[in-house]
Amino acid sequence: MMQESPDPEDDETPSQSDRLSILSQEIQTLKRSSTNNSYEERVKRLSVAELNELLEEIETAIKDYSEELVQQLALRDELEFEKEVKNSFISVLIEVQNKQREHKETAKKKKKLKNGSPQNGKQERGHMPGTYLTTVIPYEKKNGPPSVEDLQTLTKILHAMKEDSEKVPSLLTDYILKGEFLSI
């Protein structure tokens, strides 16, 4: 027969949220006991020392709740920002993939047309449309998902690729020199 192993968290002191919920329950119990008149009467019967102690407990609870609220709001903001970055990355990636597909189809059509007609010996020079759409971003699988900073960097590169910008080589070089290859 298997015995349950003791939970290591049971031995630890209660966390801040546990303390807050216990305090909250105590305050609710105090308020609910009998009627409001009973609560008021009980408070009126408390000595000054007991009232000061109750006030201290309530102020501590308010402080703890406020700290917890600030922490939770900061976490929410971080998660919202991360979600925006991820959504932006996915959107740009899909746009680039669609443009790559269009570019590939156009190149196939041009190749068929060139094969069917005689060449006039002229070759186009300079920046060819779609030059940076075929760029490959280095990939190295890491443990876990890419960081928000990495996704922002990749999103910049993908934006430049989508716009067929001449910034792609420098952005890619910076990314490679930084040494943080990502999985795409």
Image (spheres, rainbow, N blue to C red):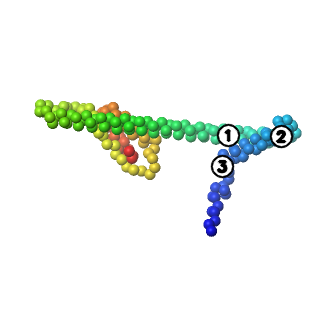
Residue, x 70% and y 47% (percent of image)?
A: 19
Q: Secondary structure at mark 2?
A: loop
The first of marks 1 and 3 along the sequence is 3
Q: Secondary structure at mark 1?
A: helix
Residue 6 can be seen in this image: yes
Q: Which residue is mark 2?
A: 34
Left or right: where 130 falls relative to 38: left
The first of marks 2 and 3 along the sequence is 3
Left or right: where 21 falls relative to 77: right
Label 2: few (<14), some or many (≥20) within 10 Å? Answer: few
Residue, x 70% and y 38% (percent of image)?
A: 62
Tell me the distance, in whole angstroms, between the alpha carbons under discs 1 and 3. Answer: 13 Å
Residue, x 73% and y 39% (percent of image)?
A: 59
Three-letter residue code for mark 1: Tyr
Of 36 and 16, nearer the camera is 36
Residue 171 can be seen in this image: no
Query: Do the residues under discs 2 and 3 have CB atoms within 8 angstroms?
Result: no
The picture places residue 138, in percent across and down from the top left corner, at: 34, 45
The picture places residue 150, in percent across and down from the top left corner, at: 42, 42
Q: Which residue is mark 1?
A: 65
Of 107 and 60, nearer the camera is 107
Left or right: where 55 falls relative to 99: right
Location of the N terminus by quadrant is bottom right
Q: Secondary structure at mark 3?
A: loop
